[in-house]
Every structure is written in C-alpha cells, then in structure tokens.
Amino acid sequence: MSTKNEARQPSVLGLLSTILLFVLFTVYGVISLNTRDLLWFWPKFENQPTSILVHCYGEHVEITPASQNFDPMTDMINRTLSGEKRWDPLSLSEATYEEYRTSPGVLTMEVNFSESVRIHTQTTFFSNVDVLVIPLDARHSSYNTLFGRTQAGDQAAGSLHVDSLDELRAYLYTHAICHPPTSSQVDQPLEVTD
C-alpha cells in the first residue's frame, strides 16, 4: 500500500526527457536571439508586393495590382519563398544589379514591397527586405538565387537559394509577359562586369 508521504524515485526516462527539453529550448532560444525572429522556423511566406518589375531582355514590364497577372504571380512568389531556403554568402554587386536592370541579354524580376518584409530563415539576413531581385535568365539564375535590397538601395547580406524558379519563368513566357530572346539576340555578346 502506498502512502502520500513516500518520495518519488528518480527515473532515467524523466532525466532524459528533462535533458531533451532543455536542449530543444536552448537551441530554439539561441537561434531566436541570433535571428531576432521568434518564428525563424516558420516556412510560409505570405506577403503582398506593391508591384513586380520584369526586366525582359532589355525591355521593362511593370505588373501592378490592377493587372490580371499580378495575383497569380504573387501566389507563385509566395509559394517559391515558402518551404526550404538555403542562405549563401553570395551577394549582389552593384555592377551585376545594374546588368540585371539594363542588359538586353537577361531576364530578371524585382518584387517591390511597401514595407520591409522578413523571410524566415535560420540566419538574421533577409529580415528587412523591401525589394527581392530574382534572376530568371541571367548570372546566378542556374542556382535558383534570390537577392534582397532595401528601398534605400542597400544590399541584404548574402542570397537565398530556393528549390526552383521554373514556374515563374514559365509563367512569364506562357502569358506573353516576356518572350525568350531570338537567335539574333542570343548571338550578341554579353558585357561581363564582375
């Protein structure tokens, strides 16, 4: 018969579960303090841009909220940035950024937000980004790279790599927002600045 005054005996299972909880809370706390983001583990990205600027092989197409293509493209961008992302120290130089905006041999997108957005990752970078620069047919595009900038023109440190940018690229081509270059455009040499 058991009495209320008997002391509980320590158990190995209780000790292991206490250690496991301590380690989990410590890891979560350290990453949260480092990133200054309590939701660093949250995979979803659900933000509404104010405009999307497509630099299409020397031409510029602005997609505004009034455009029929705006909502589908916003959904694709949000899906692309949801889920696994890998941070990389590769940063966007001013020369490459200028090439992305002006070269007749590249396809890039600039996604503009009215307020700074946070892309949840295990790093502190991409926490105050106003503009996402997405190369689709340009330098670094084969690595599914995204760069971040502020409205003041400052570059976010490093870059993010996502699973694929194929859906965005295909949408631009199939909805006649941008056309792939003709063979005469392909034959023109690109000016390399980096």
Image (spheres, rainbow, N blue to C red):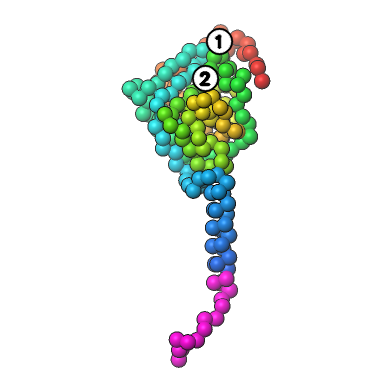
Amino acid type, callout 2 = Leu
Q: Residues within 10 Å of mark 1 (few under 14, many from 20)?
A: few
Q: Residue furthest top?
A: 184
**Residues at circles 1 and 2 in contact by the CB criterion of under 8 Å:** no
Q: Which residue is mark 2?
A: 107
Task: Give percent across and percent down for residue 180.
Answer: 50, 16
The stretch drawn in magenta includes residue 39: no
Image-based side of 1 in relation to 89, left or right: left
Residue at 41% x, 24% y: name it.
Answer: 51
Q: Which residue is mark 1?
A: 185
Task: Give percent across and percent down for residue 123.
Answer: 57, 42
Q: Quadrant of residue 103?
A: top right
Q: Magenta region, mostly helix, strand or loop?
A: loop
Query: What secondary structure is found at the residue carrying circle 2?
Result: strand
Magenta residue span: 1-15
Question: In front here: 40 or 72?
Answer: 40
Task: Give percent across and percent down for residue 5.
Answer: 47, 87
Image-based side of 194 in relation to 121, left or right: right
Image-based side of 143 in relation to 120, left or right: right
Residue at 49% x, 18% y: name it.
Answer: 55
Task: Give percent across and percent down for residue 157.
Answer: 59, 33
Q: Nearer the viewer, mark 1 or mark 2?
A: 2
